[in-house]
Image (spheres, grey):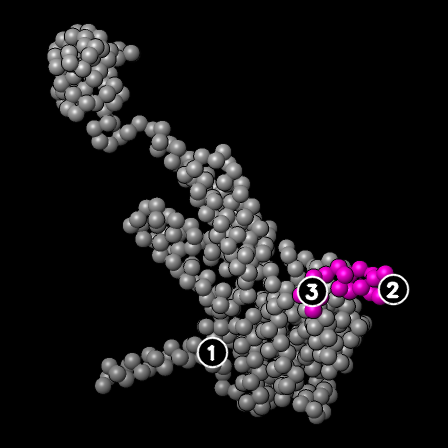
Amino acid sequence: MKGMGGAVLLLAGVLISLAGVVDAASPGDLYIVRIDGSINPASADYLMSAIEEAEDADASAILIEMDTPGGLVSSTQDIIQSMLNARIPTIVYVTPRGATATSAGTFIMLASHVAAMMPGTSIGAAHPVSLFGGSPPPAETGKDGDDGAAAGKDVVGQKMENYLAAYVESIAKQRDRNVEWAEQAVRNSVAVTAEEAVELNVIDMVVGRRSELLAAIEGRIVEVDGEEHTISVAGAREVVVEKTLLQAIFDFLSDPNVATILLAVGALGLYMEFQSPGLIVPGAVGVSALILLGFALQILPFSWVGMLFMLLGIGLLIAELFIASFGLLFAAGISCFLIGGTMVFDRPEVSDLTVDFWQVLFPLALTLSIFGAVIAYSLGRTMFSQQTAGVDEMIGLVGRCESKIEATSSVAERSRKGKVFVRGEYWNCTADEEIEPGEAVEVVEINGLTLRVRKAANA
């Protein structure tokens, strides 16, 4: 029974650690969450759970401190739906200095009851990205004077742009913010500084620290759940909501850069294990990386075309080690890997997340190149170096003739043999020239247990 009780306590401890329980809450507390990174299912679950907890605890408000480059459209919609229907005031604060509310972050800022930014931050650039992380080509003007919006863009990109523009307009209207600027942020990737955002009625205020923000919004009247609500956070206890362990893990795996690195590590680990069976560590690392990659690909929307290009690139780099292509396979492999990397998460209709070319793809390609060069150099040294194991390693060794060797020119005549002393051993031998006892000889061939020798050149 004692053992069972200990197991129950251990299980309870694990569940508590995974649940990310906050301190005991009381009515009127200020809940604080931190979004630092991409908007993905893990961060959306974290934020939505925090809002629900704050509502259940009858908190005075929830403060979302944010710094994000963007994220998945679906996750952003989940967050915004939770914010627009929240029964407590939602406050979004872009911090620290240098932080951004880019793309998906712009939508979340506009959906808040109170939007504030720290000096030195920026907001905007909410246009869905396309290949290589850029924007689709601008719309062309039609011949009849219309804007010709669809002329210069693909159908999917145009539909997504129109949808997001209408979506952000509805959010801006709901919170009485600048609708025209919100639309331009989506259609033309407009971005502004914190000070400009206040002037344009995109946000409510610019403050230098959290305490200033709380003092500035004290007594502010906002509409919450269809009714007027006065914000009261003066003296409220601050309750910081931490991510659960699972949320933190999935948030880390939801980064396209991490997924790309896991693919390269997994491929290299398996290659090293297949080349040298029994090393265990490379194989274990490779399998672990691919398992984590599988979880990441369940979260991130990816392109099979881009993934196949990356795998083809890695395959060509490996093939270069065994096929003499004079560098053609190597160049093709690097090109396929880089092209695939720029395409694998290029899904503007569902996400604006991409793989960083200079910080991730280029270093990975360089690493693969160095890895291949090291293996090729090692194989080359092995092929051209003298053998150091087995009988054949005796070829080239110098010994001493122990008995006169008569020259033989035919196989039949080679039954007459002499003896040589090589590597501490006496061997029967033959030669194509006469060699006197005591002369230095060099082994040139091994026929069974008989050596064929010649006079040593440097004797």
Quarter of the view holding residue 375: top left
Give 267 or 6, whichever is nearer the viewer. 267
| Residue denoted by label 2 | 145
Q: Residue furthest right?
A: 145
Q: Is residue 220 above or below residue 372?
A: below
Q: Main secondary structure of the magenta part?
A: loop
Magenta span:
139-159
Quarter of the view holding residue 119: bottom right
| Mark 2 → mark 3, Cα distance in angstroms | 21 Å
Please tell me the numbered disc located at residue 20: 1
Give the mark toward the camera: 3 or 1.
3
Give 269 or 91, whichever is nearer the viewer. 269
Question: Going 53% across and 52% down the picture, which residue do you hit?
Answer: 309
Question: Going 49% across and 81% down the picture, which residue do you hit?
Answer: 22
Q: Is residue 309 above or below residue 153?
A: above
Per the image, label 3 sits on a secondary structure element best described as helix
Question: Going 52% across and 72% down the picture, which residue do you hit?
Answer: 42
Amino acid type assigned to the residue bearing label 3 in the image? Val
Per the image, label 2 sits on a secondary structure element best described as loop
Looking at the image, tell me whether mark 1 or mark 2 is earlier in sequence order: 1
Point out residue 75 in the picture as x, y percentages from the top left corner: 58, 73
Q: Mark 1 Cα within 10 Å, few/some/many (few <14, many 20+)?
A: some
Q: Are marks 1 and 2 in contact (CB under 8 Å)?
A: no
